[in-house]
Amino acid sequence: MVDYYSALLRAVTAPDAGDAQWRRGMYDRARQMLAARLRERSPPARQAEIAAELSALDAAISRLEAEMSWTDRSSVVSSGDIADIGAVKPEREPIAKPMQMRGTTWLVLAVIVAALGAGGLVFWPHRAQMSAPPATKSETSNAAPKPGPMAKVATSKDGDLAAGIDGGSSDPDQGYVFRRQSTFYRTLQPVGTVIVDKLQHFLYLIQPNNVAVRYGIGLGGQCTELAGLRHVATKAEWPPWQPPPGVIERNPAPMPGGPGNPLGARLLQLDDNSSRINGTNAPKTIGTTVIFGCFRLANDDVVDLYNRVAVGAPVVVN
């Protein structure tokens, strides 16, 4: 599914974006173009697919409006407006004609519909990269024990790899949206805070000037219900792994740190002593929900995060 939130961010930074009526018109046009594009596709999208995409677009709109309300509560589009985009309410002055759209807005709408033709992958321009360069292979493997003989690859139903199988430090086929990148992110949380968005499978590290470094994550069953404020209690490089109860028969013994270890290259243990942020031996599970574990990043990404985050840093789980 297209990341409508990131695409729409470009529109709400346009000069007229502070006007609620202007934004309603832009949102309405986005819905119309999206639905038309899906119906014109070959083969045409089913009604259920159209409804799902429109629902995702509305969710992105709701998130943008909520974030804008933090800085200007008088001009936001209310949740009722979002639910009735395109409808004319009696108490509101009707919109006589389509609103004029600036070039930025049309570009965003074009990106949304073009993304559908590319299988849902969005390749839009984004703000200047402020993250460190991707970790090199030598950084990821620093101090790592040499891997033993390669075992026969075994995957579970959710795509996870068995302990001892090294799926690499990153997934070369990973969709753009889940790759590490700097992004616009407005929040009241202080710089250095980690924010985990379980629904979208993102982890944000807050930077100055409304910017965050965003990482794609895999969500493990251990932390699907976790919410609230935690702190980083300890950090470790190439941590050893203790098999959880559900996989004792498949992996009867603990595993030392190294390639193929399910905890990956780095670990950030949270202060509840049960949840954690760690790497993985199965980078293809990033962006998905799996049975075991908590919050996982590809090894290249967890090394980058580990080098940026200090012990004691707040972790907000949404």
Image (cartoon, helix red, strand yellow):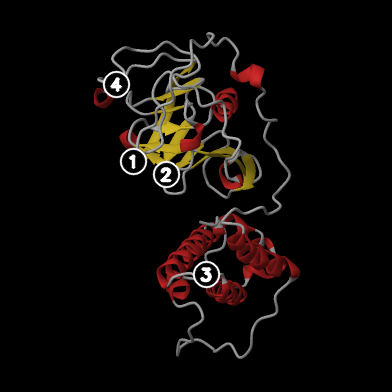
Distance in Å between CA atoms under marks 3 and 2? 32 Å
| In this view, 291 is above or below 67 | above
Q: Earlier in the sequence, mark 1 or mark 3?
A: 3
| In this view, 99 is above or below 78 | below
The residue lying at 36 percent from left, 30 percent from top is 293
| In this view, 108 is above or below 185 | below
Instruction: Kindly indicate whether the residue at mark 2 contacts the one at mark 3 (C-beta within 8 angstroms).
Output: no
Distance in Å between CA atoms under marks 1 and 3? 36 Å
Between tags 3 and 2, which lies in front? Answer: 3
Label ID, residue 198: 2
Label ID, residue 224: 1
Label ID, residue 43: 3
Between tags 4 and 2, which lies in front? Answer: 4
| In this view, 94 is above or below 7 | below
Q: Amino acid at mark 2?
A: Lys
The quadrant of the picture occupied by the C terminus is top left
Where does label 4 land, which residue?
250
Q: Amino acid at mark 4?
A: Arg
Which residue is nearer to you in this view: 117 or 229? 117
